[in-house]
Amino acid sequence: MSQILIRFLVGGAVVSAFAIIGDLLKPKSFAGLFGAAPSVALATLGLTIATEGASYAATESRSMIAGAIAFMAFASCVSWVMMRYKVSALLVTICSIPLWFGIAFGLKYIWLN
Amino acid sequence: MRIKVDLSVIGQTRWYEYAIRFLFGGLITAVAGIIAKKFGPVIGGLFLAFPAIFPASATLIEKHEKEKKEERGLRGTRRGREAASVDAAGSAMGSVGLLVFASIVWQFAPRYSTWIVLLGDTVAWLTVSVLIWYVRKQV
């Protein structure tokens, strides 16, 4: 339980820090780089290596490659839809989340199994 | 194009907007750990690149840009949408850096000290992301 709480607090802090850096920067295309910062990974990998070992963290990181590819497709889709259609950011991003799941788990079954 | 720091954004952001991002960031970090424990590191690792705060951040950018335009008496809906779209395009470029980050941990975590790997990773993520952004701007 305490490890989950530590993850929550550290994760919240690291993710927020990268988000604030992104807010402060201009142009927006550059600021967007921080939207894809490895904040969750940075918040957890140290703890994972300490508790589960480096091999476990390496396995997680191999899966993270699939997650990053899915993230790229997700962000590209959001950008494309918002540039072409009159839809709100919240609606596009929420509706595009299944795309992330589809690609991430698709790659998991093709490549990681 | 020059990179600038705009500190006025700090005043524009409400406390609950910071709180929402903290909450989502904390939740996905905790959930990624729980998933890894329950289903193993292969599935848990996928969530290290989950776009958890993306909806909140994109909505915030859209809202702030819209408000800026409306302060000048103009309709800012289109401007807000375009700003969020450009930010998302930047995130797509940054995800290549994320991929490099993950590859480095995968290859080097079992062989080198945690701090060296995490520091090297972060530098590699930033370098690759900025380089891709720069090249994209030049093309």
Image (cartoon, coloured by chain):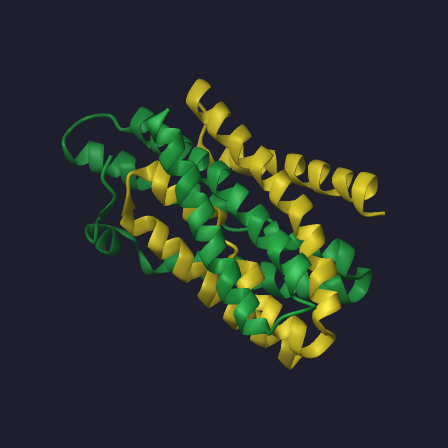
Chain colours: A yellow, B green
- B117 above or below A29? below
Q: Is residue B55 left or right of residue A68?
A: left
- B28 above or below B89? below
Quarter of the image holding residue A32?
top left
Q: Is residue B80 left or right of residue A36?
A: left
Please provide percent x and percent y for residue B118.
54, 66
Please provide percent x and percent y for residue A12.
49, 65
Q: Quadrant of the C terminus of chain B?
A: top left
Tag count = 0
Q: Farthest residue in the top direction? A: A84
- In the image shown, does A62 or B86 lie closer to the viewer? A62
Q: Farthest residue in the right direction? A: A113
- Residue under the image location 14 percent in, 32 percent down: B72
Say whether residue A76 is visible.
yes
- A14 above or below B103? below
- Residue under the image location 81 percent in, 60 percent down: B39
Q: Is residue B73 left or right of residue B104?
A: left
Say whether residue B62 is visible.
no
Quarter of the image holding residue A83?
top left
- Residue under the image location 75 percent in, 40 percent down: A107
Q: Quadrant of the N terminus of chain B?
A: top left
Q: Is residue B44 left or right of residue B81?
A: right
- In the image shown, does B32 or B135 lie closer to the viewer? B135
- Residue under the image location 63 percent in, 60 percent down: B105
- A13 above or below B8? below
Please provide percent x and percent y for residue B108.
64, 62
